[in-house]
Amino acid sequence: MKKSLVIGANGQIGSDLVLGLANRVGTENVIATDVKPGNHGEVIFELLDILDAEKLKEIIEKYNVGTVYLLAALLSATAEQKPMAAWKLNMDGLLNVLELAKEGAIDKVFWPSSIAVFGPTTPRDNTPQTTIMEPTTVYGISKLAGERWCEYYFNKYGVDVRSIRYPGLISYKAEPGGGTTDYAVAIYYKALQEGKYECYLEENTYLPMMYMEDAIKATIDLMHADKEKIKIRSSYNLAGISFSPIEISEEIKKHISDFSISYAPDFRQEIANSWPKSIDDKRAQEDWGWKNSYELNSMTSEMLEGLKSKLNITDSN
Ligand code: NAD
Ligand code: AKB
């Protein structure tokens, strides 16, 4: 069996995706890589800088890789601080992988896009699959360009590349890596550790979000769907839950009654204001049968339980 290679495996998504893939295709069929040292249990790990195209090719040949999951990127908040580094990593990394797929060295590519491809001129409620896209962040510009490259490599060279516009992802295994939606993870840590949280977004800022388990299921389902079913080769809209800081804090209060939230908006508010509030994912539902499972209440219960055990916090509430 050809192997699945995860690039950027130590990050928020990679930590869960490696496990999800190992469950689906077998531990021996997954190779985890990252630019930083990592530990993924029984799964083989290799150091790999995605900007090193030669090393990428070597690893693909060495392990007989069929599918690449390219997760290495700089996210929205970090990218605003390091625009050129973000553009280089987010674009050159993708092109390195697409070029190898074009040469036939790999069969399939997964590359994640984001709700950041949308901008202030996009309709914000129930944002359609096809609509105005004028992103105002470096990250969003790189994701929109990436989507165009993916579709181009499919149309011109027949590269089987598949993509999802992930909303903000919420998980407890690995901490998020510098996005605008990270508050929705940090709030759970602070609720358990300090009983309070100062949020960098205003209380009524709605954003599309999703629990990691749903995102991993969507990713693996998309990659295992029949090729003919994948009609969109730029990137699929994917919806989970939409909520605001005040709503997530109210949900947390059902578990930690004295939890309190305060607000000190920073530069990330402007980014959030340029993104959709909710997403229309009809095409993902129709084409490859997507349906989310988690709502705000079920996600909150799992996040708090998962973090309590990760942080060794005993129940005194
Ligand atoms: P992350 O920042 O948590 O992880 C990225 C990983 O890439 C890190 O482990 C980092 O060490 C590694 N990396 C950085 N530079 C590298 C390089 N040169 N070579 C190899 N590895 C390198 O990010 P994430 O949240 O896991 O996101 C993964 C992908 O999903 C990104 O493309 C991101 O834009 C996209 N995405 C994430 C979210 C989210 O909410 N997490 C939402 C939308 C899209
Ligand atoms: C970010 O906030 O940058 C990411 C994303 C939605 O792409 N979580």
Image (spheres, rainbow, N blue to C red):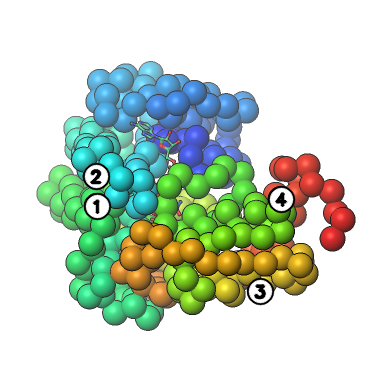
Instruction: Name the residue carrying label 3.
Output: 250
Lateral position of residue 72 relative to residue 21, left or right: left
Q: Could you give the CA–CA distance between mark 3 and mark 2, rounded to whole angstroms?
A: 36 Å
Image coordinates of residue 238 in percent, x first then y, are 42, 66
Q: Which of the two discs, 1 and 4, labels the residue nearer the N terminus?
A: 1
Q: Which of the two discs, 3 and 2, labels the residue nearer the N terminus?
A: 2
Say above or below: 261 vs 179.
below
Instruction: Name the residue carrying label 2.
Output: 83
* Residue closest to the eye, 103 or 53: 53
Q: Could you give the CA–CA distance between mark 3 and mark 1, rounded to whole angstroms?
A: 33 Å
* Residue closest to the eye, 103 or 169: 169
Residue occupying the point 57% across, 74% down: 246
Q: Quadrant of residue 270?
A: bottom left
Q: Which of the two discs, 2 and 4, labels the residue nearer the N terminus?
A: 2
Instruction: Name the residue carrying label 1.
Output: 138
Disc 4 crowd, CA 10 A, few/some/many (<14, 14-19, 20+): some
Q: Which of the two discs, 3 and 1, labels the residue nearer the N terminus?
A: 1
Residue occupying the point 38% across, 30% down: 65
Image marks 3 and 1: residues in contact by CB distance under 8 Å: no
Residue occupying the point 38% across, 24% down: 48
* Residue closest to the eye, 232 or 148: 148
Labels 1, 4: front one = 4
Image marks 2 and 1: residues in contact by CB distance under 8 Å: yes
Image coordinates of residue 187 in percent, x first then y, are 60, 58
Labels 3, 4: front one = 4
Q: In the image, what residue type sits under mark 2?
A: Pro
Say above or below: 54 vs 19.
above
Instruction: Name the residue carrying label 4.
Output: 193
Say above or below: 150 vs 58.
below
